[in-house]
């Protein structure tokens, strides 16, 4: 495997950044994960838009132009011979002697890009059975709209899910509402077939898959409400599912001890997963 690190393509096993990289010391950096399908980057423009926004919010410079970044992403995919899988991109505030204050203005941002193959069949198989989620208190900071590499609460939540025999953890805010999953956005379907997902104006990351599914759902005449929903409402919902570039649309069949619907993947979630596959297959070539 090959990684791109600060201007060079190097062997993945030997790829390294300096111990004073601020990503390592302060989690002072942001990232993106983009799905690769048939060698193409899915929704690349939306991912780079979000990267630019995350960087702007943290006052970190774009490490290179959008065009140059696109070329690095594609070259990393090509060098790793990835047909289906994902590309990971991380930008930090760079290397400088440890100090909370921003480093000198001429400090170059640190950039790392990796790519790996993931069999599309593995997700499809998981989607056939659906997944279980657990609920955990949302103990994250308020700026979860920024895609930072500071993911410790997410790491603890996902591990707790695994140890409880579940695949994902849903964060619950102080009002008892679901914010999002540890690495996914959360959705439910009400008794009358309305899709419900929390608005992206606080408490969640604006997922790219979420944005695309909102668009696909509207195009196919589904009713959609962007509003907060409680854990209690979710447990009584007709269907539930999660979305992310890594899981696409993944049906949820159990929340804590409550079976969702009849305990099998719902028809709307299953249909939306198929529609997302169509979207990815027909995405414009780079
Ligand atoms: N929320 C969180 C906290 C995430 O980490 C992710 C995945 N990056 C998502 C939502 C889903 O975002 P996307 O659809 O862009 O992968």
Image (tube, helix red, strand yellow):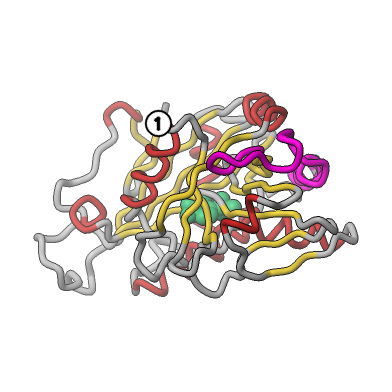
Percent coordinates x, y for residue 129 in the rendering: 68, 28
Along the line of sight, the residue nearer the viewer: 236 or 128:
236
Q: Residue at x 78, y 47 (%)?
A: 279
Percent coordinates x, y for residue 23 in the rendering: 26, 54
Q: Residue at x 85, y 59 (%)?
A: 192
- Mark 1 within 8 Å of ligand 1, using the beta carbon: no
Residue pushed farthest right? 221
Residue behind mark 1: 163
Residue 171 lies, with reference to residue 15, above or below; the image says below
In magenta, the rendered stretch is 253-281
Q: Residue at x 42, y 54 (%)?
A: 31
Along the line of sight, the residue nearer the viewer: 254 or 208:
254
**Residue 17 figure quarter:** top left
Badge 1 density bin: few <14, some 14–19, many ≥20, Cα 10 Å = few
Would you say 139 lies left or right of 259 here?
left
Q: Residue at x 46, y 64 (%)?
A: 173
Percent coordinates x, y for residue 18 in the rendering: 18, 46
Residue 132 visible: yes
Q: Secondary structure at mark 1?
A: helix
Residue 255 falls within the magenta-colored stretch:
yes
Residue 237 falls within the magenta-colored stretch:
no
How many labels, in total? 1
Residue 69 visible: no
Percent coordinates x, y for residue 68 in the rendering: 50, 56
């Amino acid at each position: 495997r090959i990684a791109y690190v600060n201007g060079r393509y190097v062997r993945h096993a030997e790829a390294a950044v300096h111990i004073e990289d601020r990503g390592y010391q302060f989690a002072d950096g942001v990232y993106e994960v983009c799905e690769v399908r048939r060698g193409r980057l899915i929704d690349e423009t939306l991912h780079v838009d979000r990267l630019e926004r995350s960087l702007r919010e943290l006052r970190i410079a774009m490490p290179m132009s959008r065009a140059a970044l696109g070329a690095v992403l594609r070259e990393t995919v090509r060098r790793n011979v990835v047909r289906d899988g994902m590309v990971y991109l991380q930008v930090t505030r760079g290397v400088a002697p440890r100090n909370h204050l921003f480093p000198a203005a001429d400090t170059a941002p640190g950039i790392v890009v990796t790519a790996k193959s993931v069999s599309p069949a593995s997700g499809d198989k998981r989607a056939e059975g659906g997944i279980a989620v657990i609920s955990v208190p949302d103990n994250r900071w308020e700026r979860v709209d920024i895609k930072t590499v500071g993911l410790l609460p997410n790491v603890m939540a996902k591990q707790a899910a695994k140890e409880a025999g579940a695949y994902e953890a849903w964060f619950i805010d102080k009002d008892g509402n679901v914010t999002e999953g540890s690495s996914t956005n959360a959705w439910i379907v009400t008794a009358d077939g309305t899709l419900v997902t929390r608005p992206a104006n606080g408490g969640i990351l604006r997922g790219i898959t979420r944005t695309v599914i909102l668009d696909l759902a509207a195009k196919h005449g589904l009713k959609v409400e962007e509003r907060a929903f409680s854990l209690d409402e979710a447990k009584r919902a007709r269907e539930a599912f999660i979305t992310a570039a890594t899981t696409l649309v993944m049906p949820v069949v159990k929340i804590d001890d409550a079976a969702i619907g009849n305990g099998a993947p719902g028809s709307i979630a299953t249909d939306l997963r198929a529609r997302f596959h169509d979207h990815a297959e027909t995405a414009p070539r780079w």
